[in-house]
Amino acid sequence: MRKLAVLHSQYKVWVPALQRAEPRLDIRGWHPEDRDLDHPWLSDCEALFAWKVPMGLLGHMPGLRWIQNSGAGVDHLVNHPELPPDVLITRADGHFGVPMARYVAAHFLWDTQALAACREAQEQCRWEGRLMAEDLGGARALILGFGRIGRRIGEVLRLLGMEVTGFVRQPRQDPDFALFGAQDLPSHLPKARLLVVVAPLTSETRGIVDRHLLAHGHGHLTLINIGRGEQVVVPDLLEALDQRRLGRAVLDVLPQEPLPPDSPLWKHPKVTLTPHHAGPSTPEAVIPDILPNLQTYAEGRTIQGAVDRSLGY
Ligand code: GLV
């Protein structure tokens, strides 16, 4: 029986769920901080299911050939100093599109439907007939990162009436959406209503939302970051909000998580913070997406669809 090691803070939930999904595997799990690992068992284990891989673990897994990431972003694995170059990494991004599109729609519509003002009027028993929703017909949404998740968000924003443009590493022809290179983002920003960052964290996207980009923004622009915290330069973001180069920022990811209590972001009136929950990684959501990989491994076939570690995703 082939072995799959699970290293996850919720391993007690994941191990039985993975075992039910693929009974042909010998699956054992540990908490990432567990010091009591079964080193002999791990030594010839070829597969690992994990989120963060602690330093020191991989030295006990010389037989490792494949890591199945429990989430979408693999920056922590691609940059892991102890991961041998020939270990395959697969992502789990197939199920995140709809929940993340809901997240974007909820936070954006909260503003454009004037929900806070409606609630305030209600609290004052005030029938405020002039409280109209903003017309999003033709309003422009820019989505940085247009893989499976970004595309789903684009589809939802388009249904809301917006004109959607995607930004990717390599511009390509797409039958449904206009796609540009990320370097074209500044020229699109002046007319945009919404910028969604959902790109993988790579050397090209690290710090991409900085003062140079935001210099092209305006006070009616909303930024929603559901990619990685390191893609937004926080001091530049605060400056842009204060100088009306940005109207509002919704941040689900931050350079340091949890966000330290003294961060000015907590209390900023134009910032909404959420605890990295836009794309929940539960077994119910993730396992159907990664089942083909589990089956491929159980049958001794070659894992398909591994990330390109040189590109970082
Ligand atoms: C979460 O951030 C993920 O990458 O799955």
Image (cartoon, rainbow, N blue to C red):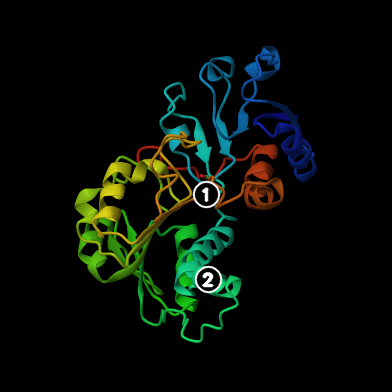
What crowding class fits label 1: few (fewer than 14 Cα within 10 Å), some (14-19), or many (20 or more)? Answer: few
Query: Which residue is most to the bottom?
Result: 129
Query: Measured from the top left, where is residue 123 in percent x and y?
Result: 60, 70
Residue placed under numbered mark 2 in the picture: 115
- Residue 149 position, x and y percent, is 49, 58
Depth order, front residue of 70/218: 218
Going by the numbered disc 2, the residue's amino acid type is Leu
Give the residue drawn at x 26%, y 49%.
Answer: 239
Residue 203 in the image: above or below residue 213: above
Q: Quadrant of residue 215?
A: bottom left
Q: Quadrant of residue 63?
A: top right
Q: CA distance from mark 1 to mark 2?
A: 18 Å
Percent across and percent down for residue 57 are: 56, 19
Is label 2 in a helix, a strand or a loop? helix
Q: Which residue is mark 1?
A: 274
Q: How many marks?
A: 2
Q: Position of residue 42 (x, y in %)?
A: 66, 19
Task: Examine the image and state in which quarter residue 175 appears.
Answer: bottom left
Residue 184 placement, left or right of 109:
left
Q: Does residue 71 appear to the left or right of 10 in the view shown?
A: left
Residue found at x 69% / y 44%: 295
